[in-house]
Structures are given as structure tokens and as C-alpha cells.
Image (cartoon, grey):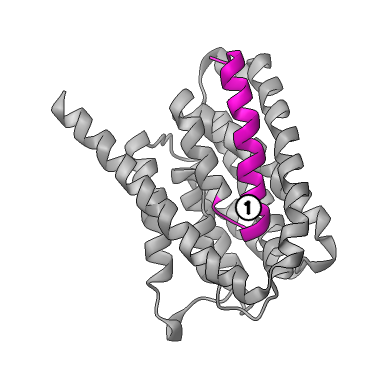
Amino acid sequence: MFSLPVMAALAVVAVVTSFVSGIFGMAGGMLLIGFLLVFLPVPVAMVFHGVIQIAANGWRAWLWRHHVKWSVVLQFGAGAVSSLVVFSFFDFVPDKALVLMAVGLMPFIALAVPQRIAPNIERGGQAFLAGAIGGAIQLVSGVTGPLLDIFYVRTGMTRQVNVATKAAAQVLGHLTKVIYFAMVIEGPAGRDLEQWLVMGYAAAFAVLGTTLSRSFLDRMSDKQFYHWTRRVILVLGAVYIAQGLWLMVTRWAM
């Protein structure tokens, strides 16, 4: 499973995806889960993704720690834990096609929300709501960046506060995902030392990519940040929808 070419590709993907997320606060996770689903079963891919994203987001939050809005993070974490508690009563492992379709549709749904009713993560109670909804989608699709962006994109946050706060919140979100799918994995796969060592290996490269992204975010303006964020997630969304549809079509044709 983890041949030398795969390990090299994993290192590159970990650096690139964490670099992208370090600049835009999203999109990297979507790329990473797509790569992992090619090589791993859904539950194992979710755990891999969660561990790597915890490393990348945790380091990003530390780099921008003076910009984190902790009140938002704590409310978000409470919502995410609530979703984990609910999902723990079910043994639900999504199909790969469902995962791809869910990930792909999220950006279009998020950006279709009218301005007058757009969510705002800084308003009372909405951070908890974002955590609850995001936690549920996290356990279904593995990523929530595009969905959660509707709570961030129309706030008065600077790009640094946006990225830092979202990173800290996402650490908690990905932690709930790792716990959930670690419980779902059956047999020796969940106790495979090689897999955990590979996760640590990939996490180290994710930290590297996050570190490299800092200077780019510093040089970017808030206007450029929000301009490119919307375009990046729509392109990725279209790619994931196409992948999900292709997988479904190939199954029907067999």
C-alpha cells in the first residue's frame, strides 16, 4: 500500500495542500481527501486526513495565535462534539461516490446563500451552529472548509483572523472525525503501527507546507484573499462532482 512512489506523492500532496490551506484557509483539505481516497478505504482515509489536517491546522493556528478569536473556537468545538455524540449512536460509513458528491456540492451551496440571510460566525450562537453542522458534514464527507466558509466569508475579519480562527476551530472538528472513524475501523487496520507512522510522516510535511504559506498570506490583501477563495473552491467543487458522477456511472455500467 505504501510503496516508495506513494510515500513520495504523499509528501508532496501534504506540503501542497497545507500550503494552499495556509493561504486561503480552505481547499487544501479537499485536495488531500481526494488523494487519500484513491489508495485507502473510506474510514482509514478519514483518519489519515484528520491526523494530517490536525497537524496542519494546529501549526497554522499557532503561527497566527495572536489573531485567533477563541470565543468562536470554543463555541464551534462544543457544536462539533455535539455532532460526534449523535453520530456515535450510528455505524455509518459513506460510499466513496457519496463523499465526492458531498464535497463537490458544498462550495456551490455555500456561495448560493443570499447576502441578507448569510450566516456570520461572529454572531451569537452561530459558531455553535457552524460546529454542529460542520461536525456532521465532517463525519460524512471528511472536509467542511467550503461549507464553513459561509460563516466566515461575510464577517469583518481580516484574512489573518479568518485563517487563524478557522484553523483552530478545524483542529477540534478534525479531532472528532478521527475519534469517530477510529471507532468505525474494524480489525487490525485500526491498530496498524505502519499506518500511524505514515500519518506522522505526512503530518510533518503538512507542517512544512503551512510554514511556507505564512509569507504569502502576509503579502496578500484582504480583498485578494476573499476574491481568490471563492474561485478556488468552485473549481475544486466542480472537479469533485465530476469524479463522483464518473464513479457512479462506471458502477452502473458494470
Identity of the residue furthest to the bottom in this view: 116
Q: Quick check: 181 above or below 146? A: above
Q: Quick check: 214 above or below 194? A: below
Q: Which residues are magenta?
A: 1-27
Q: Is residue 77 left or right of residue 101?
A: right
Can residue 40 be seen? no
Q: Nearer the viewer, residue 137 or 245?
A: 245
Q: What residue is rendered at 51% in x and 53% in y?
A: 144
Q: How many marks?
A: 1
Q: Is residue 151 left or right of residue 210?
A: left
Q: What residue is rendered at 63% in x and 23% in y?
A: 8
Residue, disc 1: 21
Percent position of residue 238, x then y: 35, 53
Q: Amino acid at mark 1?
A: Ser
Provide the major secondary structure of the magenta segment. Answer: helix
Percent position of residue 103, x then y: 42, 49
Percent position of residue 188, x then y: 57, 13
Can residue 57 be seen? yes
- Helix, strand or loop for disc 1: helix
